[in-house]
Amino acid sequence: MPASHVGAVSVLRRYPVKSMLGEVVESCEVTERGVAGDRAYALLDVETGRIASAKNPRLWRALPTIRADHDGDHVAMTLPGAGAPETSLSTADPARAGAALSAYLGREVALVSRKPGGATLQRSDPDEVLASGLDAEVHIEENEFGSLAPPGTLVDAAPVHLITTATLAAIDEHAGAPVDPVRYRPNIVVDTPELGGFAENDWSQRYARIGAEVVLRVIVGTPRCAIPTLAHGDLPVNREALRIPARHNTITTERYGRGAVAGVYAEVVRPGRIRRGDRVELDSGFDAAERV
């Protein structure tokens, strides 16, 4: 199958601290580890040794209410004020940041910039969360951390996450109101005006060529957890953000079984720089001689 033009990069995002709010960038380097600066830090639950993730919303649903932005060589984090002045923290002072984050989250946490040996994370069953609420005791899966990513990274699974505007538009249509894309935490939003909703379901095992340099291999559809339903910054809780994919795009994959999917995971086969507006093409093959 020859390369086909599917659209262009409309938004680039990175998330400096795992499960916190991220930042929009105009361009970025992409390495084998993913978007440069993405998931540069995570929080370690000191008591359990697990990585803190909003995939377990009963414990960590406050994480997406914290803003994280790169600030030179460090990451700035902003705790919401809730009627009081906001609290500004920085990885330049990890002890102060850890203490303030622990107080805000109600559990002792520490900032880490490398995956601790043997670290895992917990994922709540999303259907049970929808049915029983964020505070309910639901089935928890213990997941391998970074199972589709190079060693040492702080991403849940794969280095890069893409979603199309066609899929976002389909979710909006079914919901009857706009659902902010930030809820799905993509690195790359691809503007696909000619495609129908959930078009990226058919991209698995194909290569996405972005701009003049970067090539990604799409691995699998992104299984949706409870995170899209949570409050993100000023955005309130919204169960439709998960309920819509669960109703209209439940598929079966060999790796994840059956579940709601929106977007795709990808690995980096040729690094480089990508920019907003870059052309995106899909190709069925990739010549190893093209690697740089």
Image (cartoon, rainbow, N blue to C red):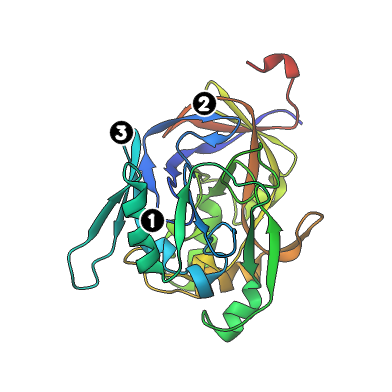
Labels 1, 2: front one: 1
Residue 151 x, y percent position in the rendering? 66, 37
Give the mark nearest the N terminus, 1 or 2. Answer: 1
CA distance for labels 1 and 2: 39 Å
Q: Residue at x 59, y 57 (%)?
A: 197
Mark 2, secondary structure of its residue:
loop
How packed mark 3 is, by other alpha carbons closer than 10 Å (few <14, some 14-19, many 20 or more), is: few
Image marks 1 and 3: residues in contact by CB distance under 8 Å: no
Query: In the orientation shown, which residue stands out farthest toward the right?
Result: 254
Residue in front for this viewpoint, 219 or 233: 233
Image marks 1 and 2: residues in contact by CB distance under 8 Å: no
Residue in front for this viewpoint, 236 or 170: 236
Type of amino acid at the residue the image marks with label 3: Gly
Kindly identify which residue carries mark 1. 98
Kindly identify which residue carries mark 3. 72
Give the mark nearest the N terminus, 3 or 2. Answer: 3
